[in-house]
Image (spheres, rainbow, N blue to C red):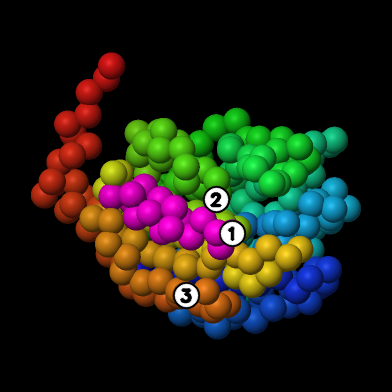
């Protein structure tokens, strides 16, 4: 299984240009089986002043473009997230699309960020974890700040997750926790974790980059640096079950 994580930077105050940039990057992953994008990449996570005015539904320009690209490439596409509007509420929402451009799953970020951030004031949190079955195994979806909550990832494992997809806009001052959480969430759940973090600067804030692919042993098998770019690598989903059988840590859990 070939996976591609796109580490994207926003074109400040130019959504159309950012969509075009993302389209070019996705087309460069034409041989990938699975592609993932970052968090609120179409306007930039820190662009709180644009959350309401640039919010979309599933028929908006962002999803329309991504559905078409998934069909053209024939890959599973994690859309990253964008500000979704439903009635009078706004959510930080990501989707998993099939190679036919159909929506397989929708995840609304459960843990909204409130530290030096307006996300928790402007948006409504989701209500439940999301795990979806695919030909490669069961995939759980998470977004950025979710990484700090191990109970979410353990809940997804209990729902059958073998691969975690994490879209993010993690800022630079906290790069060490970012690297740590990526590895630990994979290790403690004996699952693959594939993350797509933002790069570049948005509203004066530098994102950390370092998107990565982590195996069920907590080893980073591929990763990016600070700059915009694409990480592509091969993974074998069978290694999840192999790891769980070789060292049955999850089987040792106790209820208390």
Question: What residue is at 34 percent from the left and 55 percent from the top?
Answer: 183
Q: Which quadrant: the N terminus?
A: bottom left
Total marks shown come to 3
The Cα atoms of the two marked residues, 2 and 1, are separated by: 10 Å
Asked if residue 114 is positioned above or below residue 235 in the image, the reply reads above
Around disc 3, counting alpha carbons within 10 Å, would you say few (fewer than 14), some (14 to 19), or many (20 or more)?
some
Looking at the image, can residue 220 be seen? yes
Is 118 situated left or right of 222 in this image?
Answer: right
Task: Select label 2 or label 3 by which is in front.
Answer: 3
| Res 171 label | 1
Disc 1 + disc 3, Cβ < 8 Å:
no
Q: Which quadrant: the C terminus?
A: top left
> Residue 127's quadrant in the figure?
top right
Q: Upstream in the sequence, badge 2 or badge 3?
A: 2
Q: Upstream in the sequence, badge 2 or badge 1?
A: 2
Q: Position of residue 239 (x, y in %)?
A: 22, 58
Around disc 1, counting alpha carbons within 10 Å, would you say few (fewer than 14), some (14 to 19), or many (20 or more)?
many
Q: Which residue is mark 2?
A: 144
Magenta residues, start to end: 171-187
Q: Position of residue 110 (x, y in %)?
A: 58, 37
Asked if residue 76 is positioned above or below residue 133 in the image, the reply reads below
Is 71 situated left or right of 61 in this image?
Answer: left
* Residue 185 colored in magenta in the image: yes
Element type at marker 1? loop
| Res 225 label | 3
* Residue 223 colored in magenta in the image: no
Question: What residue is at 31 percent from the left and 69 percent from the top?
Answer: 221
Around disc 2, counting alpha carbons within 10 Å, would you say few (fewer than 14), some (14 to 19), or many (20 or more)?
many
């Amino acid at each position: 299984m070939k996976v591609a994580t796109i580490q994207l930077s926003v074109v400040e105050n130019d959504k159309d240009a950012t969509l075009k940039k993302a389209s070019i990057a996705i087309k460069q992953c034409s041989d990938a089986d699975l592609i993932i994008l970052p968090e609120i990449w179409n306007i930039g996570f820190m662009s709180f002043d644009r959350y309401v005015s640039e919010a979309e539904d599933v028929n908006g320009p962002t999803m329309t473009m991504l559905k078409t690209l998934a069909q053209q490439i024939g890959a599973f596409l994690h859309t990253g997230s964008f500000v979704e509007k439903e009635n009078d509420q706004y959510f930080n929402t990501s989707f998993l699309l099939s190679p036919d451009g159909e929506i397989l799953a929708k995840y609304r970020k459960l843990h909204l960020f409130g530290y030096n951030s307006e996300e928790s004031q402007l948006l409504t949190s989701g209500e439940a974890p999301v795990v979806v079955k695919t030909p490669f195994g069961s995939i759980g979806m998470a977004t950025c700040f979710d990484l700090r909550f191990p109970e979410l990832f353990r809940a997804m494992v209990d729902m059958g997750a073998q691969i975690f997809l994490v879209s993010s806009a993690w800022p630079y001052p906290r790069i060490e926790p970012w690297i740590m959480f990526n590895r630990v969430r994979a290790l403690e759940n004996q699952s693959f974790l594939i993350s797509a973090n933002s790069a570049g600067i948005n509203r004066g804030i530098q994102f950390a980059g370092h998107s990565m692919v982590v195996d069920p042993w907590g080893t980073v098998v591929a990763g990016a640096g600070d700059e915009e770019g694409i990480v592509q690598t091969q993974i074998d989903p069978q290694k999840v079950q192999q790891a769980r059988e070789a060292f049955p840590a999850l089987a040792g859990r106790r209820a208390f």
